[in-house]
């Protein structure tokens, strides 16, 4: 934790606190997500999707105020991965087993469980590419070490989710081509933020003064 999570320039916290916040974040992320899905909000897919997006933005921004950038990116991915795995073990598989049992017993399956399993599967589908990016983000220090690292993470996750939506729409014969230009704009914005900045004139003069004289 002292290497991969804590950065005194970001927040002066101890190792036990960093680990405690880490574990609590994984648990709370799942509880908030699962509670939202089971609430009346879960009956409105667009509202629920917006809530999940807000949750990820808050998670990205909040952890960047506590941990270093590399640790934050991996940790956001861990929170998303925890949600995806919990979806499978606590909702998707049990609901499928109930469906199979209902067929074997000759009773009508519970349609609510079928809808819930489908919704969680769809969420996992859209979260796949964002979590993949966080897995290899440590290879791109221009993103996690940037002063706007949380915004870069949000831009890339949003763009990857839109790319996934495009391929999903193609599979359902309702191609939404418009999402690709939007995803491209988000990625270009991320690229623009991470472009190397030219040194200021004062920086150049300081570098020249610090270098040994030649000739």
Image (tube, rainbow, N blue to C red):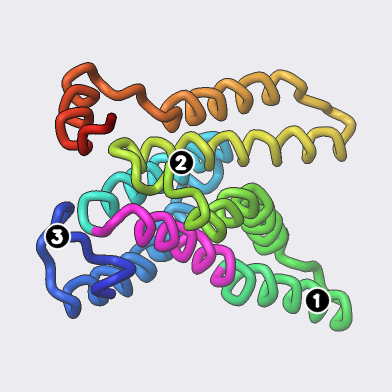
Q: Is residue 66 above or below residue 88?
A: above
Could you tell whether 12 is left or right of 199 in the image?
A: left
Which residue is at 22% across, 36% downward? 211
Judged by depth in the image, the label closer to the viewer, 1 or 2, is 2
Q: Is residue 156 above or below residue 7?
A: above
What residue is disc 1 on?
A: 102
Quarter in which the C terminus is drawn: top left
Residue 139 drawn at (x, y percent):
52, 55
Nearest to the observer: residue 1 or residue 91: 1
Q: Counting other residues with Cα less than 10 Å from the Cα at mark 1, is it few (<14), some (14-19), or many (20 or more)?
A: some
**Is 39 a magenta residue?**
no
Q: What is the span of residues highlighted in magenta in the rendered image?
A: 67-86
At mark 3, the secondary structure is: loop
Q: Which of the marked residues, 3 or 2, is nearer the chain's N terminus?
A: 3
Any mark on residue 53, and which?
A: 2
Single out the mark in the foreground, 3 or 2.
Answer: 3
User: What element does badge 2 sit on?
Assistant: helix
Nearest to viewer (mark 1 / mark 3): 3
Most extreme residue toward the front, as rendered? Answer: 215
Work out whether 171 lies above or below 107.
Answer: above
Q: Is residue 130 above or below residue 148?
A: below
Q: Quadrant of residue 30?
A: bottom left
**Left or right: residue 210 compared with residue 178:** left
Q: Is residue 35 left or right of residue 120?
A: left
Of labels 1 and 2, earlier in sequence is 2
C-alpha span from label 1 to label 2: 35 Å
């Amino acid at each position: 934790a002292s290497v991969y999570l804590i950065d005194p320039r970001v927040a002066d916290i101890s190792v036990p606190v960093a680990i405690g916040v880490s574990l609590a974040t994984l648990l709370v992320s799942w509880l908030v997500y699962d509670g939202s899905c089971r609430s009346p909000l879960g009956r409105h897919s667009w509202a629920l999707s917006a809530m999940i997006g807000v949750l990820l933005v808050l998670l990205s921004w909040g952890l960047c105020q506590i941990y270093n950038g590399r640790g934050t990116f991996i940790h956001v991915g861990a929170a998303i991965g925890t949600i995806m795995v919990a979806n499978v073990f606590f909702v998707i598989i049990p609901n499928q087993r109930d469906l199979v049992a209902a067929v074997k017993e000759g009773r009508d399956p519970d349609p609510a469980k079928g809808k819930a399993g489908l919704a969680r599967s769809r969420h996992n589908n859209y979260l796949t590419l964002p979590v993949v990016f966080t897995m290899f983000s440590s290879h791109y220090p221009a993103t996690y070490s940037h002063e706007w690292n949380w915004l870069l993470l949000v831009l890339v996750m949003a763009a990857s989710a839109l790319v996934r939506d495009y391929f999903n729409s193609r599979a359902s014969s309702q191609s939404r081509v418009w999402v690709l230009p939007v995803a491209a704009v988000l990625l270009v914005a991320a690229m623009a933020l991470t472009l190397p900045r030219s040194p200021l004139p004062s920086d150049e003069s300081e570098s020249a003064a610090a270098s040994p004289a030649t000739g």
